[in-house]
Each structure stands twice: as structure tokens, then as C-alpha cells.
Amino acid sequence: MGDGGVPLPRPCRGLGGGRGGLLRAVLATGLAFYLYRLIFGQPASPPNIVPFQPEPIPLLSDIPVIGPVLFNQAPLTYVALIAVPLTAFLLYRTAWGLDLRTVGENPRAADAAGVSVWSMRTQALVIGGALMGMGGAYLTLSQFNAFTFGVVSGRGWVSIALVVFGRREQTDARAKPARPDGRRRRVGALAGNL
């Protein structure tokens, strides 16, 4: 078993969470590409879809400069704008968030405190999967108006790099003070590619 109880092929057992997770991500990407080609073949043009239309919020969308930028968006954009402060509140101001962060940092300590590690990991996996699904839905239904394999184009890898360089803190990595090793420049360069 790998970390989180997911079975791994024999050569992969014993890998840490980061390496094992990256290996599973690469394997899942290859499997998804294979199944996509198996089901849809090689179409001449990607399947067309009806995109989400921007839904302006009355009065707020009329504010000069920021109104059209923030309040004339697709519905999934509004969900994302609400999800950021809601996630911060849940992670840092509730007992559930404390349990989840404890399970992530030290599962043995969480288990000793009576927290179900398996349950918390499952909840995090389901919520994270739902958020990733919403991100993929936004790309296909709002931004590109079509589905093609590889529509994400590596954006997830950039976000993983931002998490690593930002020391797994939720605050904006670009707003951190510059460090002597130039870490802030690297994070800013990565964030600029989003």
C-alpha cells in the first residue's frame, strides 16, 4: 500500500508521499489519455460544447474598473471567489481544519488525539477532487469552450511548485518578503505563468 491506502505497483512501494503521488499522477494522466483515445478516437475537431455565459451581478458590475473584472464573470468564477475565503476560514478557524492540518503534518499525533486519519484523508481527497473537477469544468465550459485532452496544459504542476516554494502556506507566495537566496523571484516567475 502507498500512502493514503492506495495500492501501488511493487516497484513503487516505499516511496514517500511526494514521489508516490507524482508517480500516481503520471500514471493517471497516461491512463486518461489512453481511455480518451479509446472512447473518442482521433476526431478531426474537438467536441463542441455550449459555454457558460458571463452573469453580471446587478449594481456591482457597474462599478468603474473593478466592476466588469470581478462582477461580470461566469458562475464558476463566483464559486472560486467565494471558495478562497471559505477555505481559509475552514482550515484556520474551525476544529475540522485543525484536525485536517494535523493529519497532514503528523498523522500519528492526530491518531493519538482520537482523530480518524483515514476519514480526514478521505474528506480531503473528496473535497480536493471536487475543486479540481470544478477547475477542469471552468477550463472546458468557460475559457476554451471545447474539450481536448491536455486542456490543463501543466497548470497543476505550476500550482504544486507554488505550494512547495510558498512553504505550504495559504498566503500569496508573491507577497512574501524577498529572501537572500532569491526564492521570491522564482515564486513570482512561476506565479506570473498562471
Image: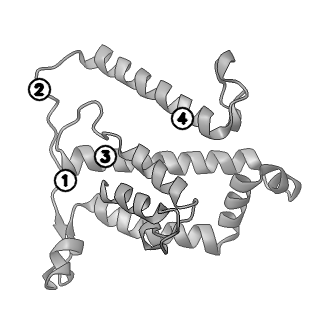
Q: Which mark is residue 45?
A: 2
Residue placed under numbered mark 3 in the picture: 137
Q: Which mark is residue 22?
A: 4
Q: Residue at x 18, y 66 (%)?
A: 55
Q: Coloured how?
A: one colour
Q: Where is residue 32 drawn, in percent x and y? A: 39, 25
Identify whether 172 is placed above or below 51. below
Element under label 3? helix
24 and 127: which is toward the camera: 24
6 and 188: which is toward the camera: 188
| Mark closer to the chain start, 4 or 2 | 4
- Circles 4 and 2, Cβ within 8 Å, touching? The answer is no
Q: Residues within 10 Å of mark 3 (few under 14, many from 20)?
A: some
Quarter of the C terminus within the rendering: bottom left
State how far apart marks 3 and 2 are (Cα). Answer: 19 Å
Q: Residues within 10 Å of mark 2 (few under 14, many from 20)?
A: few
Q: Quadrant of residue 57?
A: bottom left
The amino acid on which the numbered mark 1 sits, given as a three-letter code, is: Phe
State how far apart marks 4 and 2 are (Cα). Answer: 31 Å
The amino acid on which the numbered mark 3 sits, given as a three-letter code, is: Ala
Identify whether 127 is placed above or below 39. below
Element under label 4? helix
Q: Image check: 98 left or right of 23?
A: right
Q: Where is residue 191 drawn, in percent x and y? A: 36, 59
